[in-house]
Amino acid sequence: MALEGRFSSSGFVKSVTAVDCVCERSAMRVRGGQLIRRKTAYDGMTVALCKTDMDLRF
C-alpha cells in the first residue's frame, strides 16, 4: 500500500504479506483522517482506529 506516514511495522507481517504494516495503513486508507489508536494486538488479531469527519444526510 503506497500510503505516506509513520506506521508501526512488523517483520512477521512483512514475511507473510510483503508489506510491513497492514492495520494502521488500512484504517487510514479507507477515509483518511487522524489515526487515534495505533496498532493494538490481542488474541492473534491487530486493530487500529482512525477518526474522520462524516456528513450524514437523511
Image: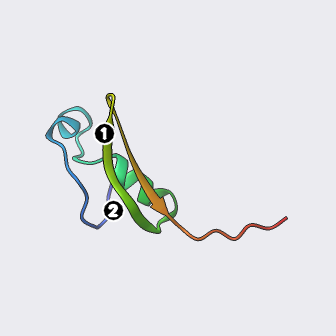
Outermost residue on the left side: it is 11
Q: Callout 2: helix, strand or loop?
A: loop
Q: Kindly identify the amino acid type of the residue bearing the numbered disc 1.
A: Ala
Q: Kindly identify the amino acid type of the residue bearing the numbered disc 2.
A: Leu
Residue appearing at x 33%, y 35% in the figure: 42
Residue appearing at x 21%, y 47% in the figure: 20
Which image quarter: residue 56?
Answer: bottom right
Marks 1 and 2, how far apart at CA: 21 Å
Quadrant (top left/top right/bottom left/bottom right) for the C terminus: bottom right
The answer to whether mark 1 and mark 2 are in CB contact below 8 A is no
Q: Is residue 53 left or right of residue 19?
A: right
Give the answer, above or below, for where 58 lies relative to 14.
below
For label 1, count other residues whose C-alpha is less than 10 Å away and answer few (under 14), some (14-19) or many (20+): few
Q: Which mark is residue 3?
A: 2
For label 2, count other residues whose C-alpha is less than 10 Å away and answer few (under 14), some (14-19) or many (20+): few
Q: Which residue is mark 1?
A: 41
